Amino acid sequence: MTTTTASTHASASAAEDRAPGFASLMLSEWTKIRSVRSTVWSLAVLVVLTLVFTALFMQMGIANWDKTDPSQQAEMRADPTGTILGSGILLSQLAVCVLGVMAIASEYSTGMIRSSLLAVPRRVPVLAAKGAVFGLLVLVVGEVTAFGSFFIGAPILEGKAPVAIGDPGVLRAVVGCGLYLALLGLFALAVGAIIRHTAASITAVVGFVLVLTPMAGLLPGSVGEHVYASLPTEAGFMITQQHERAGDLLGPWEGLGVLALWTAALLAVAAVLLRRRDA
């Protein structure tokens, strides 16, 4: 009995010794993402289309300026950065949500996740490495998109709503836009890890962003306002505003913190389920 127990412990210890380190896991996950051409091309198209849509929306806004309601004109003058970033962010966040889900749910669909988990006795580092690589990738792409959108949109708005990168709140909003997209991507990745089915996960995330969140804004009273303000995408998106607006319940960094808490909670649930369920 003692000999058997010792042998078992020795085998487990040897397996852990052979397990790749976290840096190797990150390299492996980076290789997976880089080798899937659809992901690389999707991110490239995301950047280009977001910049194109930003330019188009800004040009349309200027062309129709005299026909625009005075209240909307005042809002654009008060927060030109939010106007610029918000014009193309819808496309960006939908693409990031889909890619976040596919980053892990597609591995369950193809069975590739089994190979990843066989190489690592403890499963949580696999999820952590995947999240770290995907989050950093989306952060870089998000920052490129955000800064590109700003430097395209600011000259177009110059005559009606001038803004510069050095103005109060502008740099924070532009940098925050990339952070928002990175956290949203991890949020979607966590949902994909929990549901483990690509189509169902995408439906859940996109439905939450496009359907549930706007519907929550229709809830009456103070309770409805607090529920709406606490939803992850609504709260996180506030970081893209140059200035706080009247009636905002959360500040820009507070809103991003709410999104971070939602994301952390879902990733924790995903980690627990990954340890308990079969691949």
Image (cartoon, rainbow, N blue to C red):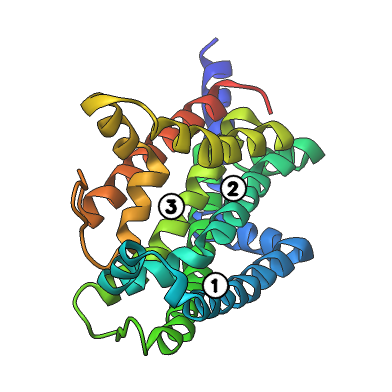
Considering the numbered disc 3 on the image, is that residue within a helix, a strand or a loop? helix
Q: According to the image, label 2 marks what residue?
A: 18
The numbered dot on residue 57 is 1
Label 3 CA crowd tier, 10 Å (few <14, some 14–19, many 20+): many
Spatial CA span between label 3 and label 1: 25 Å
**Measuring 53% from the left and 25% from the top, which residue is drawn there?**
273
The mark nearer the N terminus, 3 or 1, is 1
Q: Does 115 sit above or below residue 132? A: above
Mark 2: few/some/many CA within 10 Å (<14, 14-19, 20+): few
Residue extending farthest to the right is 110
Q: Of the two numbered discs 3 and 2 on the same chain, state the one appearing first in sequence.
A: 2
Mark 2 or 1: in front is 1
Whether pointer 2 and pointer 1 mark residues with C-beta atoms closer than 8 Å, the reply is no
State the CA–CA distance, disc 3 to disc 2.
Answer: 32 Å
Q: Give x and y (percent) for residue 80.
A: 34, 74
134 vs 157, left or right, is right
Q: Position of residue 50 (x, y in %)?
A: 59, 70
Task: Please report the residue visible at 43 percent of the width from the left and 76 percent of the height from the top.
Answer: 66
Q: Is residue 24 visible?
A: no
Q: Secondary structure at mark 2?
A: helix
Using a 10 Å C-alpha cutoff, classify the residue at mark 1 as few (fewer than 14 neighbours), some (14 to 19) or many (20 or more): some
Instruction: Return the residue nearer the eye: 123 or 251.
Output: 251
* Residue farthest to the front, as pictured: 67
In the drawing, what numbered circle is on residue 9?
none
> Number of callouts in the render?
3
Mark 2 or mark 1: whose residue is earlier in sequence: 2
Seen at 29% across and 86% down, the residue is 164
- Give, as a three-letter code, the residue at label 3: Leu
Which amino acid lies under the numbered mark 1 shown in the image of this protein?
Phe
Residue shown at 37% from the left, 89% from the top: 158
Residue at which label 3 appears: 183
